[in-house]
Amino acid sequence: MTAAVHTIAVEPLRAAVRELMLGFGSAPAEIELVTDNLIQANLTGHDSHGIGMLPRYANAFLEGGLVPNAHVQTRLDCGTLLALDGRAGFGQVIGHEAMALGIARAREHGSCIVALANSHHLCRIGAWAEMAVEAGLVSVHFVNVISRPIVAPWGGRDARFGTNPFAVGIPVAGRDPVILDLATSVVAQGKTRVAHNKGEALAPGQLLDNEGNPTTDPRYGVIEPLGALRTFGEHKGFGLALVCELLGGALAGGLAVHGPTDGKQRVLNGMLTILFDPARLGESAVYGPEMQAFLDWVVESPAQAGTDRVRVAGEPERETRAKRLAHGIPVDATTWGELLAAAGKLGRDPALVNRLAGVATG
């Protein structure tokens, strides 16, 4: 049975999340960064990385695996090469600070490589690519995930690593940027939680059950006994996941997955980010028109049956953001109940959170 859905306007939802965030003891600036980042994820349609993450954040905090009010620490500074430690702080803060440092260096020198270790959940990696393109920079991001292994290697029957995101941001003169943001699994783990909470099945080919058999039941991504997500593109996604683990994890983060979970709720990310100023690399009068001409050529391809037109990476998110800003953000009742329970765990009044969001009590 499909769960009921609340549709909540952006500003009331923002007020409700701010109230919950007070339970972490976060400073005002941290509350704003976390709240905005999570709601932006919902606005783009990535509900798996939106406010539904707060219950897990609450559990991680109560276990001691998430450290509020932590700030990024510089471990190595070679000008165009930075090694940073996130000190298990909120990824919304740590990611923002790391990108700000890298962007400043790339503007100064033309490029910068940022190796970030030990950040709590960096959330939607596309947000950091968007931050780079707003500064006129190209960015490439390799990310690993230190938590319960949830993705099976190609040809394997059980989980051995995380969803290991990969993202690229490319500014394009005269039009919206290209923002490629993907998990190397077929779907993000959070999408199994969203599907389970909504009472919906997954598409075939996305998930294995606890015995390594294909299943469409999202419970195997959420409830014991757990199964494993599959990599996208078969061996190709598996190869990219390995690269993300080696570069974002072992190299940048100093920590890769090599064993089962310890049962903790914290989610740690390592991220290797490459930033550069395209204007330093070539003549903008040449590459700009070439980019535009290529994108025009691609999107003019006749639409297949069941689609209205070709869209480039980043465009679906912008369309969803416009719709949800106008009509509100859908939050299924199960996820909303989990969020209210998290508020209670953090010492905040669930009824107040509910009232701020304007959610009717039944």
Image (cartoon, helix red, strand yellow):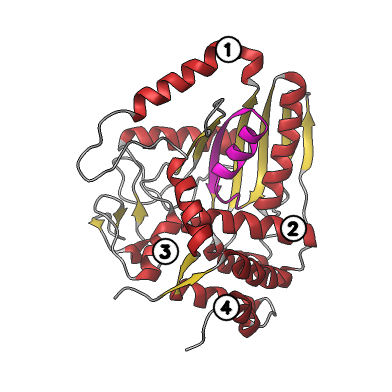
- Amino acid type, residue under disc 4 in the picture: Gly
**Viewer-closest of 65 and 195:** 195
**Viewer-closest of 299 and 267:** 299
For marks 1 and 3, give the one nearer the viewer: 1
- Amino acid type, residue under disc 3 in the picture: Val
Vertically, is 14 above or below 129? Answer: below
Cα–Cα span, label 4 and label 3: 22 Å
Cα–Cα span, label 1 and label 3: 45 Å
Q: Are marks 1 and 3 in contact (CB under 8 Å)?
A: no
Q: Report crowding for label 2: few under 14, some 14 to 19, many 20 or more residues within 10 A (C-alpha).
A: many
Q: Which residue is mark 4?
A: 358
Q: SS of the residue at dot 1?
A: helix
Q: Which residue is mark 1?
A: 285
Q: Which residues are magenta?
A: 121-145
- Amino acid type, residue under disc 2 in the picture: Glu
Query: Could you tell me which quadrant the N terminus lies in?
Result: bottom left
